[in-house]
Amino acid sequence: MKSQPTLTIGEGGDLDGTSVAALQAGIDYLSASGGGTLQILPGVFRLENALKLRSGVRIQGSGPETVLTKNDYLESPLATDSDWYQSDITLTNPDGFQEGMGIALYANAPHHDGQSIIKRSLIGRDGKKFLLDQPLTKNFWADHEAVAKVLFPIISGEEVRNIEIQNLRIDGNGQNNPNFNGNYGGGIFMQDCEKVKIRNLEIVNYNGDGISWQICHDVEVENCLSQGNTDLGFHPGSGSQRPILRNNRSIENGIGIFFCWGVKNGIAEDNELVGNLNYGVSIGHRDNRNRVANNRIMGSGKVGVLFRKENGGRDPLNNSIENNLIQDSGEFGVDIQGNPSGTHLASNRIVQESKPGTGVGIRIGEEVTGLVLSKNSIEGFETDIDDRRTL
């Protein structure tokens, strides 16, 4: 079998450049060659657009000395309407906008309540008019507060498979960028992908999620640090099957690990979730048969492990929380709301040391059925178990 090629990029590499265009050229060359490894040498790579993944291509940095970071933020209102079939936009203030930039278009939806958001790239310019890489699929009307924002994931994959990303640092430059919702962006963002391995990364300072993947199957995230990101450290997103999160650190994010809608048969084990502002782990809408085990969940601002309240029979089912240390949560060590039937809570040490005599170890909501509690150690709380069920 013919071995796949390796292409180096950076100072002294096969490709000598630090732009996203140079990085993307390397990935696209390898993709056209049937796959291979893009070896990114040490250096700071400042990106004006997302680095787009291709099937069968591995991205490998040289450790934390390989830094991918986002450029500073720009925005401009749209000067004229752009309808859903158009491939161009016209900006009121185009200063600083350039071909090759990644943007997110925002507008109040003209036909219903809510907001429209679409990601595109600028590929041509004529004065204040910019050509887009793809036609629009929604309406962006000037009188509905349509605006173009230079926002994008730093690494992005859509409908690709057999990918590896490893050994580099992603810096979101969050102090110079506004928030970007984790359903559209993140330090790494993937949509409709399969068989992805992410290892030995540092994802820091992104004004949004550290790593977010939506409807992606068999994603493995190991030995990664997600720190200081505004929203979710790790976001296995809607419909994702069989995610594995192992030996990671999620530190000082909004939430440590967030199981979104319909995440099934996932494993989160041997992770360290420390100082996350709201929750260490959050599980909710139809998240079934997930195992959260052997983690250190410490210093969560509100709750160590939260089962979110869902309505209309959309509760998570048959999840297990086992052998975790859940320490110094703000309000509750574990908070079980709604009716997450089949929840198995076993052999956890749930402890309050920083503020002894405060908070609740385990709160059980009044609708909960089918809960199994076994061999949990609860220490230091005002109330060990607040069981609100009518027995």
Image: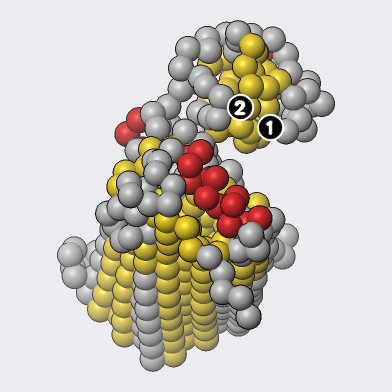
Closest to the observer: 366 or 126?
126
Placement of 88 over or under 218, stated as above or below: above
Q: Residue at x 44, y 47 (%)?
A: 15
Q: Residue 102 location in percent, x, y?
A: 55, 33
Q: Residue at x 46, y 22 (%)?
A: 74
Placement of 304 over or under 10, stated as above or below: below
Q: The N terminus appears in which quarter of the rendering?
A: bottom right
Closest to the observer: 180 or 128?
128
Closest to the observer: 371 or 121?
121
Q: Is residue 364 left or right of residue 314?
A: left
Q: Quadrant of residue 47?
A: top left
Q: Which residue is mark 1?
A: 133
Placement of 92 over or under 289, stated as above or below: above
Specify whether residue 11 is in view: yes
Could you say whether the residue bearing mark 1 is in a helix, strand or loop? loop
Count residues near mark 2 (Cα–Cα under 10 Å), then give few for <14, some for 14-19, many for 20+.
Answer: many
**Mark 2 vs mark 1, CA separation in Å:** 6 Å
Mark 1 residue type? Asp
Mark 2 residue type? Leu
The disc, 2 or 1, on the residue closer to the chain's N-terminal end is 2
Q: Quadrant of residue 79?
A: top right
Q: Is residue 61 left or right of residue 23?
A: left
Could you say whether the residue bearing mark 2 is in a helix, strand or loop? strand
Q: Residue 361 location in percent, x, y?
A: 34, 72
Q: Residue at x 53, y 65 (%)?
A: 5
Q: Residue at x 42, y 56 (%)?
A: 8
Q: Residue furthest bottom?
A: 375
Q: Which residue is mark 2?
A: 122
